[in-house]
Image (cartoon, rainbow, N blue to C red):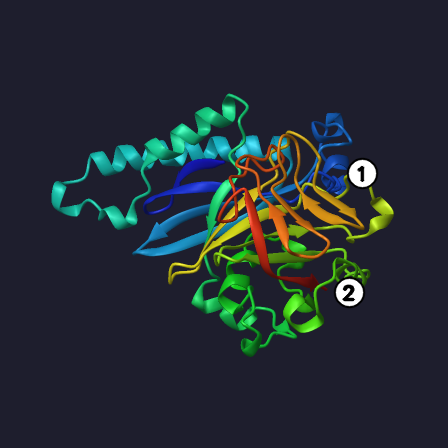
Amino acid sequence: MHRSASQENLGTMTTTNSGSNSKNNNNANNSNDEGENLSSSSSMEMYEILWKEDGEMKRLAFEANAEGFIHVSKRVQKWSEEAKIAINAMPADTIPSSNDVVVVAAASSAVEKEEEGEKQTKRILEPMPKSQVSQQPELVGYAVKNAPIIDQMISSCLISALPSRFRRSAWTLKYSSKRDGISLHSLYRAVRHSPATVLAVRDTNGYCFGAFSTEVWSTQNANRYFGTGESFVFAIEKDGDDTVTCFSWSGKNDYFQIAKSESLGVGGGSNYALWIDEDFTRGISGSYCETYNSECLASGEDFDVLNVEIYGID
């Protein structure tokens, strides 16, 4: 979802899904008569206000429930309208360059779709700002010689989509099919103590993609879905810029994770967002998955697996 905003220039407001199972801020509810009338199932989510200032992307993150988001979004919309009026009133030679302006029309289109009930789940993830690189968690077990799917640049992009409580956590390579051999059961054993994980797959055509999940991958949950709305799927565009496209939870169903002895799956409905068999030879990524409103992540809806790895976010 996008909203337009302004500081010195126009900006956007985006949602960072923090899940459907987050707890309410009870202290805030107790101190606010209006808050006492909120449903106890109201969830907190992470949001970001983005804008450009002097050519540099600025970001302000905040956490809010549904009512808080509505309040802030109205303010953001007002800022955007004021900024647009101010820019239109500027002399032609003082109007900021196109690199410093986010077009309001694009944000308005997203708002209309949101109001129609279609949640916008797709977004491009950017690496951490250079000023914060020193704070990036270490990739434990990472080795360049193994040609890993997830490297420092990709993890830097994915961190921005993680729930805030995981953004400083270490990433430990729990399983790699190149390092540990091909076995779904070995993968399950490796992450049995890691509820939060990043699964990554590379197919034989070089496409890389995966999923962030928030519950332990275990066959004890066989034949039923589990997980939370904090999960998301992603695709890595190996075009020299390592562009990462993320699809967060759509809210249409709760088919987040499914773990069987013969396969592993993410997402559901008419198609899986990601599915691989126990031998890591064959995989599926549907053209559309309702859970995340995601597109096909792989080189094709049916693909051959080259290698698999999974990180524990501890």
Query: Which residue is at the far right?
Result: 220
Residue 298 placement (x, y as % from top left): 52, 48
Q: Earlier along the polypeptide chain: callout 1 or callout 2? A: 2
Q: How many marks?
A: 2
Q: Residue at x 71, y 31 (%)?
A: 35
> What amino acid is found at the position of numbered circle 2 in the picture?
Ala
Q: Is residue 13 above or below residue 128?
A: above
Looking at the picture, how far across and down is residue 257, in whole percent?
72, 44
Secondary structure beneath disc 1?
A: loop
Determine whether 58 is above or below 14 in the image: below
Res 163 seen here: no
Identify the residue at horizontal 63%, vertical 39% (top origin). Answer: 272
In x, y percent, where is residue 145? Answer: 55, 78
Q: Mark 1: which amino acid?
A: Arg
Per the model, the C-alpha gap separating discs 1 and 2 is 21 Å
Give above or below for 13 relative to 151: above
> Visible in this render: residue 73?
yes
In the visual, does 81 lie left or right of 125? left
- Callout 2: SS: helix
Q: Residue furthest top?
A: 116
> In the rendered view, would you say 205 is above or below 132?
above
> Is 166 positioned to the left or the right of 60 in the image?
right
Residue corresponding to mark 2: 190
Label 1: few (<14), some (14–19) or many (≥20) C-alpha neighbours in 10 Å = few
Q: Position of residue 30 (x, y in %)?
A: 77, 36
Q: Residue at x 39, y 29 (%)?
A: 108
Q: Which residue is mark 1?
A: 224
